[in-house]
Amino acid sequence: MRAMRLLWRRTRIQNRIFWRTPVAAFFTLVFPILMMVLFTAIFGNDPFDTVYGRVSSSQFYTPGLAVFAAASSTYTNIGINLASRRELGILKRVRGTPLPPWIYLGGVVLSAVWIAALGVAAMVVLGVAAYGVNVEAAKVPAMLVTFAVGAASFAALGLALSSVARSVNMAVPIANATLLPLAFISNIFVPFGTDTPAWLDLLGNIFPLKHFGLAFGEAMNPFSDAPAFEWHRLGVLLIWLAAGAAVAAWRFSWEPPVIAGRSSRRRRRPVPA
Amino acid sequence: MGPAVAVSELVKDYGAVRAVDGVSFEVERGEVFALLGPNGAGKSTIVEILEGHRTRTAGTALVLDTDPASAGASFRDRIGIVLQSSGIDPELTVREAIDFYGAAYSRPVPTGELIELVELDEKADARISTLSGGQKRRIDMALGLVGDPDVVFLDEPTTGFDPVARRRGWELVERLASEQRAVLLTTHYLDEAETLADRVAVLAKGRIVAEGTPAELRARAGSALIRFTVPDRAEPVADLLAPISGDIVGRDRQVEITTDAPTADLAHLTGWAAQRGFELEGLTVSTPSLEDVYLSLVGDDGDTAAGEGDSEP
């Protein structure tokens, strides 16, 4: 009970930290919405052929960009957040308190998933309200389950990212250099059709983002049959979840990186009397 | 119930480098114990082993009768750590940070009380990122004390303080000891160790080269230091210095005598000079400072390693 209370507090503190970091809030929540508005303005909202069938461009972009928002608020934010907290010695401080490590990390993950939910909700509401995007009650459970599995999977990958990247200066480029190119080959920014090169198709299929997007897209697709669960895609996401958790369990460190930590100390330390 | 901290034959290797080489000491409740030494002497490594941040290679380490290497949350509930290298979420305010870190402890000190204790009242609702270096050290101190700890580890607690803040910090540490907490302090400020510590261990290259009260350590350098300048006309001085019992160091005409018999030596010196009508210019008698002892114990390491940061990996 006490553990749950602590976890709740931790999550709220972490939310507060997120909202006080305007850059993170912008890229996570505003950026995908901006892209949605721009894409539909540039390409028009006319129907075209997509993997979902012939749908409007907003119908195509809404689930993809919603999933993209979810992935960046979990994978990118957790990865960068924890790498920076490690570098600042905050993780080490936490490790010296009676707060159980799983509650600290749990708060970080739950907060990121909460922000992801807000990002997805904002995108879906915008799609429905402004562009008449299709959402059906019978397929909402599939949307929710897909979101939960996908967000958990990308949160685990965020933990893995923060374990592999020992500094913020590594975490930021790794996050961007993985998620952004992946978005291009995952039917998120660019619609994939029958004329897509097979190797790009295959490459996209290896990674989790495409499965997250397509599973969520099917749950919003006006032509899919309820309940519209894409179990095999959720299965791929769960495999990535396990892989991310395994890397984190293997490599995660609470200690500040030796070189960065020492050099910042060196600057601060005055010559002894 | 044993001493609050008991370390015996502690050894820590980093690869081929032996950072801590057979260190033993104990800290009682209500006592301030200082580990004094140049950077890289092993101070931080010892403290981090006792905090449970690092594992040891050999020897025993007990804090509150618990092995820190295998201890869990209930152990960390009773210790307080003020590390030099650990940050605080810059986005939070002082009050939020103390609230949050306090929430993990079983008997947190009320936030307002702590803010007052470390004199951050005016900054209570300011973001951590806006605090000055000295203010950050004070909230570090507050976060170390928020769990009402039985043992407090202070890693160079007043580094970055201005002289006034330093005095205040010292008062706080003295207060901690008076509240029957055990305080283990690392410092490379000699005056800090001398002012605060009931006992001091001087570390060099991973070993304790001297241990005792500051007064005991000072006594190692003799009980008095006599300095004067030999008058130009007073040649030769051999018969002046011959009967002196202490160690004599002379440079040009400056003479420094370290002695355990200052009264007798001084009587001889002044008698000799008065008889001949000489004045021993600049004659002073003083107690050797801990600094004199320290520098003789750690040699030049204290100078060459200064400002380099601990070289412990």
Image: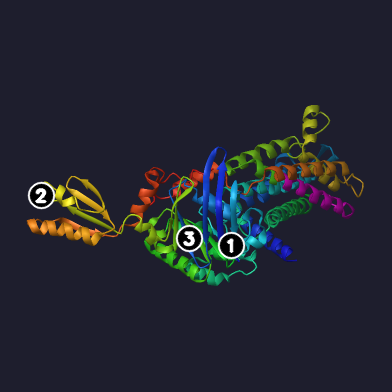
Q: Write the start and end of the magenta stretch as one range.
A: A132-158
- Asked if residue B289 lies left or right of residue A65, the reply is left
Q: Earlier in the sequence, mark 3 or mark 1?
A: 3
Residue type beneath disc 1: Ile
- List the residue tagged with mark 1: B79
Mark 2 closeness class: few <14, some 14–19, many ≥20 residues within 10 Å: few
Q: How far apart are the alpha carbons under marks 1 and 2?
A: 63 Å
Q: Nearer the viewer, residue B165 or B277?
A: B277
Location of residue B274 in the rendering, given as x and y in whole percent from the top left corner: 10, 59
Marks 3 and 1 belong to one chain = yes
For the residue pair A272 and B257, the one nearer the viewer reads as B257
Q: Chain of mark 1?
A: B
Q: Report in which chain the residue with disc 2 lies.
A: B
- State the image quarter where residue B228 is shown: bottom left
Q: Residue at x 86, y 53 (%)?
A: A141
Query: The disc labelled 2 sits on which kind of residue?
Result: Ala
Residue B234: mark in rendering: 2
Q: Quadrant of the C terminus of chain B?
A: top right
Give how far across and how far down residue B176 sits, in percent. Answer: 50, 68
Depth check, front residue: B186 or A261: B186
Q: Could you say whether the residue bearing mark 2 is in a helix, strand or loop?
A: loop
Q: Main secondary structure of the magenta part?
A: helix
Specify whether residue B72 is painted magenta. no
Discs 1, 2 touching: Cβ within 8 Å: no
Which residue position holds label 3? B33
